[in-house]
Every structure is written in C-alpha cells, then in structure tokens.
C-alpha cells in the first residue's frame, strides 16, 4: 500500500510539470505564429511599397525623357525650318558682304533665333567661303575666324553632313565660364553646295537638366543623369565625371539593398530606372535611394526574450511605428494617384493596362464599366485651395453616404484652383436614359451641397455616357466644353447632350438692327423693346450652337451700331458705351443691360428742347435754300455738310415741307426754271444747268412731271 501510495504521489507531482510544459509549448507556438504573421505582414507591406516606388520611378524618368524629346524636337524643327524657309537669312548668306549693315542684320537675325525658345543658349553662323564665324555667346556679338573660334568642334562634320546634332560638350564664353551645350547644325541653304553657310543653334544642357529636375520635384535622394550610345555620361547635376564610362552592370540591377542583412530587412533601397530614347539616342537614368522603416531585428529579439505582456506592448508599439512610417508613403501615393487621374482626364498619359491597374481601387473599378464626368467650376477670383479642398471633402463624404448602390461609384479629383472633376462609374445594367437621369440627379445634388453664397457663380458641366475608360479624356473635354455655353442654358447644370445635336449657325439680323435703329432715332421706346425681344429670341434659339463669346459679340455689334448711328445727332447724348458684358453669365442680365442702354438713348432723344429743334429746322431749310441749285446736291452730301444722320435729316425736311428731300428740291428747281425760261436768250440746256441738273433730258422729264408740259412748250405758251 505504501508503495502504491508513493507511486500515486509521484504521478501527481509530475502532472503540474507536464501541464506547465504544455502551456509553455502552446504559448511559445502561439507567440511564434503571431511573430511569423507580423513578420510576413511586414515584408508584404514592404514589398508592395518597393514595387510602387519602382513603378513611380519608371514613370518619372519616362516623363522627363519625353519632355526632353519634345523640347529637342521643337528646337530641331525650328532650326531646319529657319534653314529652309527664312528668306532674310538666305539672302544674307547668298549675298554676303562684310559691310556694317550686313553684319548688323546677321547678328540681329542670330539674336532672334536665340529668342525662339527659352532653352536656346546661343547661335553661330559660319561662312566657309570667307572663313568667318558669327556668335551670340554670352549675349556678345562676336566675329572671328574658324581657327580662333572657341567651339570649332561644332563644324567638324560640315564636309560630311548637311544637318546633324552634337552630343553635349563643354565650351567657354567670353567670361571664361564653362557651359554644357547641345549643338544642332544645319547648312543654309540645306542642299546648295555654293554660297552657303552653316547655322548652329546651341541648347543650354544645364538649364534643360535643371528644368527637368524642377518638373520631377527632385529630392536629395535622387540622382538623375544621361549617357549616350557610347556609354559615356553626357549630362549630370554638377558637370563632374562627364564623359566617363557608365557601369552598365550596376544599371542592370533595378533594385539593390544596403544595410544590415539588406536583402532580408530591406532598410535601404536603391531603385534604378533607365529609359532609352530612340529619337535622341540617349539613355535617361534616375537613381533613387529610399530609407525604409527598419529596426526589425531588435524588435524580434524583444518578442523572443520578454514576457507575454511586453510582447503585446511591443506589438502595439510596432503597429504604431508601422503606421507612422508608412503615413508619408501613403500621402505620396495618394498625391501620385491624384496626379495620375489628372493626366488621364487631360489626355496626358496613355491608358495602358498598367495605368488602369494603378487607377483601380477597392471601391472604384475601371474594367467593364460605363463612365461620365461632372466638372464643377466656381467663378470666384478669391477662391483658394483650402476652400476648394473643403468643398471636395464635403462632396466626397456626401457621395460616400449616397452610394449605397453597388452599381454606381464616384471618384473626386481636384483639377485646378477653381475646378473639381467627379468621375462617375456605372455598370452596364441600365439604359442610357436611366444613366442620364442618374447623372442629372447627382449633378443637382452636388450643386445643392454648395454654400448658397457660391451657387450663383457655380456651374456644373455634364458629359455624355461613355462606353469605356479609354474615352475618359473625351468625357472630361465635353464637360469643360459646356462652360462656353452658359448663356444657352437656363440652369447651372450644363449637359453636353443639350448642344451635341445642334447644327444651326447664327446669321446676324441686319434688317432687325436697321428697324431697331430707325425707331430709336425717333425715340420710339415701345417698338424698340419689341425688336430687342425678337433679337433675344433669335439668340436663344434651341437649334443654334453659339458660344457665350459669340453671343456677347453679337450684342456688342448691335450696341456699336446704335452708338455709330446716334453719334451724328446734333444734340448731346451722354451714354456710357463701355458696358461690360464679360462679367455676366446670364442672358437675362445681359438683355436687361441692353434694354437699359436703349431706354437711356430714347430718353435723351425725347428730351430735345423745342427752341433748339426750331433752330435746327431753320438751319436745315436755309441750307437747302442756298444749295439746292448745286449739281452735286443730294441727301448724303447734305447730311455730311450738316454733320447729321441722313434719316434724321429726311425726317426734318418731311416735317417742314411735307415732301421728301428729292421731291422738295425738284419743286424748288422747277419754280426757278419757270422764271429763267422767260429769258429767251437762255437755252433749255442753260436753264437745266443753272437750276442744278447735269442733263437737260432729265430736267425736261422732271419739269413735265411737275407742270404737265415740257419746258419748250411752257416757253411757247407764255409768248
């Protein structure tokens, strides 16, 4: 019994040790799993981050290279066009003379070539026949022989090629300052072997380089340089180690690591991106060194050596550190994403599969969707980025709460200081009518979210529905286009579908303008309003596709015609003709301004003083009395001599004589001719000329129409 009792006690004593070891093993296994999961998560995040950096690095160096290509292509085209088509330059070369005027003309032409582009540093013109080189280096006009010229290398290949380009090379200016330039050489004329010169245009490689750094917002951790087909460095930041060979082996490794167990913890990443330009025959290299969050070795040691409580605390601290260190990365990726969206909408980037993959988010998909764009435009000179960001934030929150429907998603992008773009993504389950109905509803709700103080100056441009993401630039362009047609719409919601089928062209109503002016000159305000209403109805025709600037131009044309016609009135009219329609975006406001303008003119015309009118009428009749016998007397001459509007002059004659000017003058001339016919010595032709007729047959015709007989018959009848 004692033996059994001792055995049982031994087993009972060992049981706690077994349980303890089991707990320890389970705890160790659990902690190991936690640590492994954290490490795997850490490396997963780090790999994703590095891949994004690599993609961003490739995109940046490609954009810079394309920028270089565009600048160099533009300058080359300008040089070759100058060599081909500049008649002045061809004349200077083919008729070269070393006199002062010719030298002045040549240097002036070279200076004008330098001003063609901001990156052109200088220009040379070499005359092989006369062994003279003209240069604008350092803005000093210099003429030297080729042997004394500081940049003879520019002309080394003129006997072999008519046009060529030189890789960057170093030259010194008049002040012994070293400069890195790219030379573009062309003979002038290009194909003539006699009497020709050689034009050299030098591009400032340093300025072009630093402009590229500015565009890519280079950081101290970035090293950007170029090398040529001979694998020699041709452009870098400090002009150091130029023309030395490139380590092609290192360029073959896109990603390298430094630091403690570099490939394991990846604490210091070097990313190298190379873009080869077929056009320039150069290679663009961007090396970026990124210090990624590190310290994992020490953290792993803490996880292994400390107690469970300290491990949990360390895990919490680790999560905080990861969040803190990756926050700038998230911010950078967010800015990159916004920039990418801007480039897509403005058609500055090709929508490749890689770009689509970068654009897609968890809540916004690109593939197999239909799209449209809403652009919010706020016309306010004091609008700042803070206010616009605030409005975009409100819109984002609003649409996030609104979009419970899985079939419709929203992406908001701030395009510039006064525009916000809203990209709407639909599935293909609806008809186009339902799509457009949803789009109008979204636009109206976005407009209603605006501060009431800003609604009057806010417009929303709506595109039509597009079948694929590749048409997003077209969609954005349609929305922007609608801001030219604010006057065509009675709403601040401007849908492209309203104008896309309009084909009518506006024909200015000159007849209506003439009728309006005629009534204006006699002060008939009510009739003027009727004609203005008709003019307004024509402008607002639903079949016309007229931009706001065109409509305002027609209104300016009408206003100027009115001002021109009232300027001849011999009465003072004080009208402010500088009515500014450019600040108005509502057709009702514009037409109200025109109505007020016409009302003021009518009021001024109707305020004529009666005594002044009597004096004016007498002056007109006295003028007619003195001049009706002149052969050149007519309405236009009378209006010019009296500085009066011819319509107003005709109105005065009609009021005073009861006849038109022509009838009144013919009556006066007939009465005078009857007196002259009593003088037998005067022939019919003499009488006609004395009363103002150039031709006797016309005088006879008028006389007979007035008296019923010819002048000869009248003379015979009076004996």
Image (tube, rainbow, N blue to C red):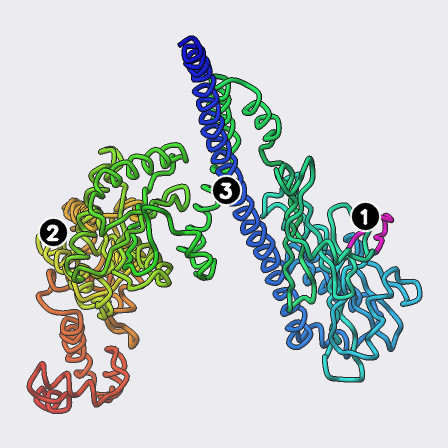
Residue that mark 2 sits on: 525
The first of marks 3 and 1 along the sequence is: 3
Residue that mark 1 sits on: 240
Q: Which residues are magenta?
A: 171-180
The first of marks 2 and 3 along the sequence is: 3
Circle 1: element type: loop
Residues at circles 2 and 1 in contact by the CB criterion of under 8 Å: no
Q: Which mark is residue 44?
A: 3
Q: CA distance from mark 2 to mark 1?
A: 81 Å
The quadrant of the picture occupied by the C terminus is: bottom left
Q: Against 711, is 295 above or below?
A: above
**Whether residue 245 can be seen here:** yes
User: Whole-percent x and y of residue 715?
Assistant: 13, 88
Circle 2: element type: helix
Counting other residues with Cα less than 10 Å from the Cα at mark 1, is it few (<14), some (14-19), or many (20 or more)? few
The first of marks 2 and 1 along the sequence is: 1
In the image, 32 versus 547, the foreground residue is: 32
Counting other residues with Cα less than 10 Å from the Cα at mark 3, is it few (<14), some (14-19), or many (20 or more)? few
Q: Is residue 270 left or right of residue 498?
A: right
The quadrant of the picture occupied by the N terminus is: top left
User: Whole-percent x and y of residue 207?
Assistant: 69, 50
Q: How many marks?
A: 3
In the image, 172 versus 699, the foreground residue is: 172
Q: Residue furthest left?
A: 708
Q: CA distance from mark 3 to mark 1?
A: 39 Å
């Amino acid at each position: 019994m004692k033996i059994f009792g001792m055995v049982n006690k031994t087993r009972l004593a060992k049981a706690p040790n077994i349980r303890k070891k089991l707990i320890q093993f389970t705890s160790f296994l659990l902690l190991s799993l936690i640590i492994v999961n954290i490490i795997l998560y850490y490396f997963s995040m780090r790999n994703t981050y590095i891949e994004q950096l690599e993609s961003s690095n490739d995109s940046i160096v490609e954009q810079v290279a394309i920028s270089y290509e565009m600048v160099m292509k533009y300058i080359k085209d300008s040089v070759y066009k100058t060599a081909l088509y500049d008649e002045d330059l061809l004349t200077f070369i083919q008729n070269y003379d070393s006199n002062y005027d010719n030298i002045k003309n040549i240097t002036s032409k070279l200076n004008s070539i330098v001003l063609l582009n901001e990156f052109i540093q200088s220009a040379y013109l070499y005359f092989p026949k006369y062994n003279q080189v003209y240069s604008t280096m350092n803005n000093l006009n210099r003429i030297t022989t080729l042997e004394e010229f500081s940049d003879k290398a520019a002309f080394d290949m003129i006997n072999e090629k008519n046009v060529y380009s030189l890789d960057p090379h170093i030259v010194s200016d008049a002040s012994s300052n070293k400069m890195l330039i790219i030379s573009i050489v062309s003979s002038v004329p290009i194909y003539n072997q006699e009497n020709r010169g050689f034009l050299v245009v030098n591009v400032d490689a340093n300025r072009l380089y630093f402009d590229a750094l500015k565009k890519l917002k280079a950081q101290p951790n970035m090293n950007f340089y170029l090398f040529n087909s001979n694998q020699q460095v041709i452009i870098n930041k400090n002009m150091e180690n130029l023309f030395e060979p490139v380590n092609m082996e290192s360029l073959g490794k896109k990603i390298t690591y430094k630091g403690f167990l570099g490939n394991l913890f990846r604490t210091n990443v070097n990313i190298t991106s190379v873009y080869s330009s077929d056009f320039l025959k150069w290679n663009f290299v961007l090396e970026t060194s990124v210090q990624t969050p590190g310290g994992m070795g020490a953290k792993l040691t803490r996880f292994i050596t400390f107690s469970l409580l300290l491990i949990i605390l360390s895990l919490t601290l680790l999560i905080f550190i990861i969040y803190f260190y990756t926050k700038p990365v998230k911010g950078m990726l967010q800015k990159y994403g916004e920039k990418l969206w801007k480039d897509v909408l403005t058609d500055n980037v090709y929508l490749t599969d890689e770009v689509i993959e970068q654009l897609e988010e968890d809540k916004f998909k690109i593939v197999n969707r239909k799209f449209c764009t809403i652009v919010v435009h706020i016309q306010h000179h004091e609008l700042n980025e803070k206010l616009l960001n605030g409005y975009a934030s409100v819109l984002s929150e609003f649409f996030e709460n609104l979009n419970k429907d899985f079939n419709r998603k929203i992406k908001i992008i701030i395009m510039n200081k006064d525009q916000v773009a809203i990209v709407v993504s639909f599935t293909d389950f609806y008809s186009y009518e339902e799509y457009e109905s949803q789009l109008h509803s979204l636009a109206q709700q976005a407009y209603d979210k605006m501060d009431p103080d800003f609604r009057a100056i806010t417009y929303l441009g709506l595109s039509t529905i597009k079948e694929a993401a590749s048409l997003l630039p077209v969609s954005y362009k349609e929305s922007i286009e609608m801001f030219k047609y604010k006057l065509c719409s009675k709403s601040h919601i401007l849908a492209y579908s309203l104008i896309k089928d309009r084909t009518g062209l506006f024909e200015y109503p000159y007849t209506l303008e003439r009728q309006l002016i005629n009534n204006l000159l006699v002060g008939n305000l009510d009739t003027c309003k009727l004609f203005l209403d008709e003019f307004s109805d024509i402008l607002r025709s639903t079949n016309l596709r007229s931009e706001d600037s065109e409509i305002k131009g027609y209104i300016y044309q009408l206003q100027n015609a009115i001002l021109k016609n009232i300027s001849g009135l011999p009465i003072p009219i004080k009208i402010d003709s500088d009515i500014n329609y450019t600040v108005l975006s509502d057709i009702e406001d514009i037409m109200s301004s025109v109505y007020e303008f016409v009302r003021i003119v009518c009021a001024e015309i109707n305020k004529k003083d009666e005594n002044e009118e009597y004096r004016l009428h007498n002056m007109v009749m006295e003028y007619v009395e003195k001049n009706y016998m002149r052969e050149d007397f007519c309405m236009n001459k009378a209006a010019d001599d009296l500085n009066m509007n011819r319509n107003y002059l005709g109105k005065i004659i009609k009021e005073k004589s009861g006849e038109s000017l022509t009838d009144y003058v013919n009556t006066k001339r007939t009465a005078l001719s009857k007196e002259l016919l009593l003088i037998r010595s005067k022939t019919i032709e003499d009488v006609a000329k004395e009363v103002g007729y150039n031709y006797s047959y016309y005088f006879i015709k008028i006389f007979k129409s007035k008296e019923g007989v010819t002048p000869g018959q009248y003379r015979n009848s009076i004996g």
